[in-house]
Amino acid sequence: MGLTDVIDQIKDWPLKRKVALIFSVVLSIALIAGIVMWSERIDFQVLYSNLGTEDAGQVVVRLKEMKVPYNVEGNVIYVPSNRVYDLRLELASQGVPQGGGVGFEIFDKTQLGVTEFVQKLNYRRALQGELSRTIKQLAEVDQCRVHIAIPEKTIFTDREQHPTASVVLKLKGGRVLNNAQIGGIVHLIASSVEGMRPHDVTVIDNMGTLLSKSSGASGDSAADSKQLEYQKSVEKEYESRLQSMMEGVIGRGKAIVRVATKIDFTQIEKTEERYDPDTIAVRSEQRVQDKSSGPSSGGGVPGVMSNQPGSGQSGAGGGGASAQKQTESINYEVSRSVSKILQPRGEVKSVSVAVLVDGTYKKEKDKKVYVPRNEADLKKYDELVRAAIGFNKDRGDQVIVSNVSFEESVEDIVPEKTDYMKIVSSVLKYLVPIIVVLILVLFVLKPIIDILKVPVRRPEFAPESISMGVGGGKIQEEVSPDEVVKDQVLSIVKQDPRKAAGVLKEWMSE
């Protein structure tokens, strides 16, 4: 069957069939065009999100220069998925995005005629930008801004002022900074600016909450915070030990442990001096003995008469005089002991533990029924907890183990979610065109071909029925076309009734 035959056959179709053919062809072309456009559609993924206005503008300019297609939705920039990582590396090599503010790269380009004031201003901007980038490296920090105020230097030392700094932090959802991290930020900024002291740095969050502690207050506040952190660390250590022990016995997620401690942070220094009167020791002993001897002096009655010549002297022939002196000194020492006692700081005075234990479950008629634990099990758990914390009744320790029903679904670690939509989209990208082509072939092209194969029957007029005969000198009357068609239809119906019935059904459907 040639092309002309096909065209002739289509011309003989009824109007409804021609309209249906045109609609099918147009629909098929539209579907094919849509599938081609969908399969060639660019899959966009996030390149950067939560960028500042300046950084987003720089990224867009670079993408335009590189002639890379992109989409911008709010503060999110999308690029083709197959070029996400390449573009990130290439933009990073160009210093984009800068991460909030300009850094020391502002001095990469030398500018002539810049005044000293502009140089100082650029230096301050660069320092603020570099500090912001450094602080943003913390896992808890989402955005950061640093403001530094550097006073003018003066020759009068009594009027000299120190630089000050303010830091505004925007933390990521659900994240908090501990005191050690805040102190690290404060000392980082104070060490980066000449003449700045740590208490000259103020740190707040995006809600206006003051995070840094003012050093103008006494050191007691800092000591209190350290003591509180120490107490929390002790309680957390107890809880982790008890939690791992209980879960090892009754199963994961079947126990909840809470610990409260009382810690004495007072530091006592005591000096004791003791004397033992029963123990006496000779400390020193000194003995001194003095003896002296010499001639005797004149005797008699003292006076003038006894000294006159011729007067007799009694005891003239007597011997010399002598003297003796003895001194003794003994020092005794009583036994004495001196002890200096320094009691440690942070002594645990008491421990209170509360343990909630889940029961067991059994199935009854496709339902889970809670079964509480018996008293023997609870007593065993109580003894284990007491042994784990070093229970001491004298210091006021408390342990309570209770059996309660937990919720049926225990929250487990959520595995990493698989992006099924992405997988399905990539599969459909190649599967849908095949399915559509098969549908077009089976339900559009094949019926059209089958219809074209069926010839359209035309009314044929027999020459002998139309010709004029000269018989008996009479001319035969011309037969009407309707009667000829009627006769042909009747003959076809007689020859093949089944085929005739099919043709009638087709006509009726049209």
Image: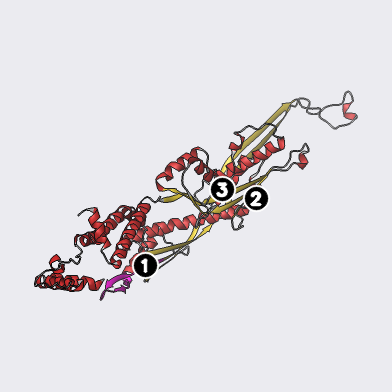
Q: Is residue 257 left or right of residue 460?
A: right
Q: Residue placed at 14% from the left, 65% from the top?
A: 463
Q: Nearer the viewer, residue 354 or 460?
A: 460
**Residue 405 position (above or below residue 247):** below
What residue type is disc 1 on? Answer: Val
Which residue bears the numbered disc 3? 340
What is the three-letter code of the residue carrying label 2? Answer: Ser
User: Which dot marks residue 215?
Assistant: 2
Where's residue 492, x and y in %? 13, 70
Q: Is residue 356 magenta?
A: yes
Q: Which residues are magenta?
A: 355-376
Dot 1: element: strand
Whether pointer 2 and pointer 3 mark residues with C-beta atoms closer than 8 Å, the reply is no
At numbered mark 3, what does the secondary structure look like: helix, strand or loop? Answer: strand
From the top left corner, tell me how far across and down residue 209 is, in percent: 60, 57
**Front-lying residue, 302 or 226:** 226
Residue tagged 1? 357
Note whether 424 is above or below 371 in the view shown. Answer: above
> How many C-alpha atoms fall within 10 Å of the one at disc 1: few (<14), some, or many (≥20)?
many
First in sequence: mark 1 or mark 2?
2
Residue 317: quarter of image: top right
Q: Secondary structure at mark 2?
A: loop
Q: Would you call the spot at circle 3 few (<14 residues within 10 Å), some (14-19), or many (20 or more)?
A: few
Of the two numbered discs 1 and 3 on the same chain, state the one appearing first in sequence.
3
User: Is residue 277 something one can see in this rendering?
Assistant: no
Q: Position of residue 474 (x, y in %)?
A: 12, 73
Between 259 and 386, the one nearer to me in the picture: 259
Q: Is residue 394 visible?
A: yes
Residue 279 is one of the magenta-drawn residues = no
Mark 2 crowdedness (10 Å alpha carbons): few <14, some 14-19, many ≥20: few
Q: In 3D space, how far apart are the residues under numbered discs 1 and 2 (Cα atoms)?
A: 46 Å
